Image: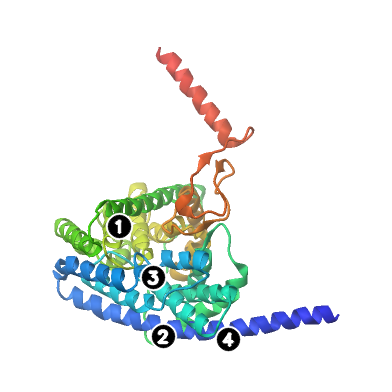
Amino acid sequence: MRKRLAEESILFISILKWVVLATGVGALIGLVVTVFLKLLGWGTALGTNHPYAFVILPIALFISALMIRYLAPDAKGHGTEKVIEAIHKHSGHIKAAVVPVKLVATLITLCAGGSAGKEGPCAQIGAGVSSILAGLMKFDAHDRKKLVICGISAGFATVFGTPIAGSIFGVEVLFVGTILYDVLLPSFIAGITSYQVSSALGIQYFYHPVKLVPVFNETFFLKVILAGIFFGLCSMMLIEVLKLGEKCARWVRIWEPFKGLIGGAALVVIALIFSTRYLGLGLETIEECLRGEAVPWYAFLLKPLCTSITLNFGGSGGVVTPIFFVGATSGMVYARLMGLNLATFSAMGFVSVLAGCANTPIAASILAVEMFGPAIAPYATVACVISFLMTGHRSVYHSQILAIPKSESIHVEIGKEMAGIEATFAPRKKGMVTRMLIWSRAIERTFKRLGK
């Protein structure tokens, strides 16, 4: 009896401790991220009022790269990646200088028209503030990591405006195939608190309930499955374009800020040839798709290129908003090809490409409910899981740790970072995949004989 009471007392104290800590962290991060979002809103509005403001992109990326190189190298790139790396490799230690440098560099990049997102900086700001607090309170490595994860969830919840999906995303994004259940409670509390604080301080969020989902039938469900496969391929494309940009940036061996000049010039040329819709956050294009309006079919191809140039050549920002752009525009393309409702499949693409690129099918499915309403949820969930599987062992976040393989017929090293994963075919004697390969080879040999 005493042992049971002791166990319950310890659990009660632990719950109370993390309720208090997560509430405090969520409120603080909600305040800091709100300041960032308001500054970003004012800066982007100023850029919108000057249609040729994007011509200063080379200077903006030069300044951003200069700041990051000499003030906080960990602020480089899209933010979330560095936070995941800090949790897995440095017990959640994040240098205090990262927070202000990331905030200013991202503002410079996005306000000038750089193609990036705002969620990565918010996650890095949240994690950085949490790391500073953990240091002040002399936390051990375990509690520090836990508090930093709360900071990530609070940052995502605040910037998305979806407290549940944002909180889950902060936990799910760390590993591929598993979730840290001991961090769920504080992550939810931190995410909900930060969202409430930002809402109370006047941050407006985008919600777009989808009402045109047809009544269930087998044909429509088959098209949803095919859409999941298509969104998985789009996710692969986006990941590979980002990787290609990283390789190109390494190949250009010059002083880092000069790469900003090159990248900024390339973005100016793309904007002059095509349109400025592929620069900045791209929220207007996303909203057009979700309203059922057609946009250029190649939009989902150009946005990854602009984002890769921005993030690999001196810019600072997140990658999730570009993922939303690619998802919404690719969904529009799929719907036009299949003669389906544009808004419905733009919404499905919005969440499915996130599931594929970030390996977060649970958070993406919940995001569909919070942002687009329950009617689309069953179909979006199926598309999200298929996209997640189709992407294979790839990720926009190289530091994610693989917990399970996506197929028993594929051999991968468990517990390794996604950047170092090498997937090889591991046939099972009685497996369906093996049988299909045998059949396909037999058919191929038959056609060759007939040809002779």
| 220 horizontally vs 329: left or right | right
Question: Mark 3 or mark 1: which comes first in sequence?
Answer: 3
Label 4 vs label 3: CA separation? 25 Å
Compared with 449, 295 (above or below) is below
Q: Residues within 10 Å of mark 2 (few under 14, many from 20)?
A: some
Q: Which is more toward the observer, 153 or 262?
A: 262
Question: Mark 2 or mark 1: which comes first in sequence?
Answer: 2
**Marking on residue 98:** none
Identify the residue at the far top of this view.
Answer: 452
Question: Mark 4 or mark 3: which comes first in sequence?
Answer: 4
Q: Residues within 10 Å of mark 3 (few under 14, many from 20)?
A: many
| 31 horizontally vs 169: left or right | left
Question: Mark 2 or mark 4: which comes first in sequence?
Answer: 4
Residue type of the residue flagged with mark 2: Leu
The residue located at (44%, 57%) in the rendering is 398
Residue type of the residue flagged with mark 1: Ser
The residue located at (40%, 61%) in the rendering is 350
**Marking on residue 31:** 2
Q: Which is more toward the observer, 137 or 29?
A: 137
Q: Which is more toward the observer, 103 or 346?
A: 103
Q: Which residue carries the number 3 mark?
A: 119
Q: Position of residue 25 (x, y in %)?
A: 50, 83
Judge whether residue 234 can be spotted in this image.
yes
